[in-house]
């Protein structure tokens, strides 16, 4: 329960709003840009800010010169609840829209277009493989890429070494959690 409104109650509110929209009794702009809570109407931006502040902090930093050159990333704080990492095909092609962070790579590819996802929670992060051929390594522990490997791993506060693709890949980062 958050702000006095339970999940079931929020679902009921959304159903009522949906019915009102269908009947033309509600203003679509107000419904699309607002979230109805027990204290009235609040903007999605204020809810996102509150959610972001309650989640654990995460920074991602390149761990090699080659990774810095491929990603053009120096270091960044992950500020969204869900953060997707993937491959940009070649040097000119556009990255998929659903990827938050792209790594430039040419054939032979070792990364997927949607390679992995980092999900923030209040006291940990979960990093999951999105079904790529090679998966990734966290501190030399294989995640994804093989039928026997776990598909995700939960990380508490600390610094972790993330290698995307096969063991020995030059695409590596440091994740600073907490």
Image (cartoon, rainbow, N blue to C red):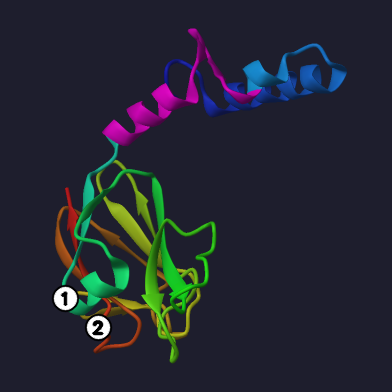
The extreme left residue here reads: 158
Give me the C-alpha separation between circle 2 and circle 1: 7 Å
- Say which residue label 1 marks: 64
Secondary element at image label 1: loop
Which numbered tag is attached to residue 4?
none
Residue 104: x and y in percent read 38, 74
153 left or right of 65 in image? right
The answer to whether any part of residue 13 appears in the image is no
Residue position marked by numbered label 2 in the rendering: 170
Q: Toward which corner of the image does residue 21 lie, by quadrant?
A: top right
Q: Residue at x 23, y 52 (%)?
A: 76
Q: Is residue 119 visible?
A: yes
| Identity of the residue furthest to the front in this view | 92
153 w.r.t. 34: above or below: below
Q: Position of residue 177 (x, y in %)?
A: 19, 53
Which one is earlier in the sequence, the residue at label 2 or at label 1?
1
Circles 2 and 1: CB distance less than 8 Å?
yes
């Amino acid at each position: 329960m958050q702000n006095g409104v339970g999940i079931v109650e929020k679902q009921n509110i959304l159903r009522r709003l949906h019915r009102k929209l269908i009947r033309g009794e509600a203003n679509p702009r107000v419904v699309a840009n607002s979230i109805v809570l027990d204290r009235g109407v609040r903007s999605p931006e204020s809810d996102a800010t509150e959610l972001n502040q309650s989640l654990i902090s995460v920074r991602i930093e390149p761990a090699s010169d080659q990774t810095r050159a491929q990603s053009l990333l120096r270091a960044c704080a992950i500020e969204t609840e869900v953060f997707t990492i993937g491959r940009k095909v070649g040097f000119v092609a556009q990255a998929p829209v659903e990827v938050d962070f792209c790594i430039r790579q040419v054939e032979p590819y070792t990364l997927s277009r949607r390679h992995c996802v980092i999900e923030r929670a209040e006291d940990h992060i979960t990093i999951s493989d999105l079904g790529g051929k090679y998966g990734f390594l966290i501190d030399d522990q294989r995640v994804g890429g093989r039928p026997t490997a776990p598909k995700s791993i939960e990380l508490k506060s600390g610094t972790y070494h993330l290698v995307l693709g096969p063991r020995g890949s030059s695409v590596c980062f440091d994740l600073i959690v907490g």
